[in-house]
Amino acid sequence: MKKTLGTIIVAAAVIMITATFSFAEYAAAGVTNFPFFQLGCLIVGGLIMVSLKRKYEKMYVGEVVGVFALYAVLMALFTNPVINAVKVIVS
């Protein structure tokens, strides 16, 4: 039961972080420049994290959620709106 509850919590966190990423990128870039490749990478990474949590019981829920949140930030850094904003700030 504990294993299932931890997996459900991780899956819910992955879904919420992915939805937040999608909303933020849609708001920043719009439909024409939406980063579908980064969204796909984020979904695949989330599936891998959930499966790792399910396989290894000694992983804490907070660790997995934290790692996925950092992964989402990394994915967001390599999208066109963020790169354009950094270019504007630097120049």
Image (tube, rainbow, N blue to C red):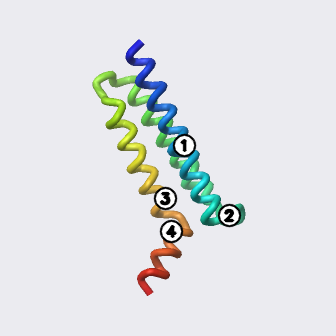
The kind of residue tagged 1 is: Ile
Res. 74 image quadrant: bottom left
Disc 4 on helix, strand or loop?
helix
Residue 67 higher or lower than 9, as above or below: below
Q: Residue furthest bottom?
A: 91
Disc 1 on helix, strand or loop?
helix
The kind of residue tagged 2 is: Gly
Mark 4 vs 1, N-terminal side:
1
Mark 3 vs 2, N-terminal side:
2
Q: Do residues under tags 4 and 3 come within 8 Å of each other at their CB atoms?
A: yes
Q: CA distance from mark 1 to mark 3?
A: 13 Å
Image coordinates of residue 4 in percent, x first then y, are: 44, 18
Reading the image, the residue beneath label 1 is 43
Q: Residue furthest right?
A: 32
* Front one among 86 and 56: 86
Q: At x 50% / y 75%, what residue is drawn? A: 85
Residue 67 higher or lower than 10, as above or below: below
Mark 1 vs 3, N-terminal side:
1
Q: CA distance from mark 4 to mark 2?
A: 13 Å
Mark 1 vs 2, N-terminal side:
2
Q: Which mark is residue 30?
A: 2
Residue 85 higher or lower than 6, as above or below: below
Image coordinates of residue 17 in percent, x first then y, are: 50, 44
Q: At x 33% / y 24%, what residue is drawn? A: 56
Reading the image, the residue beneath label 4 is 82
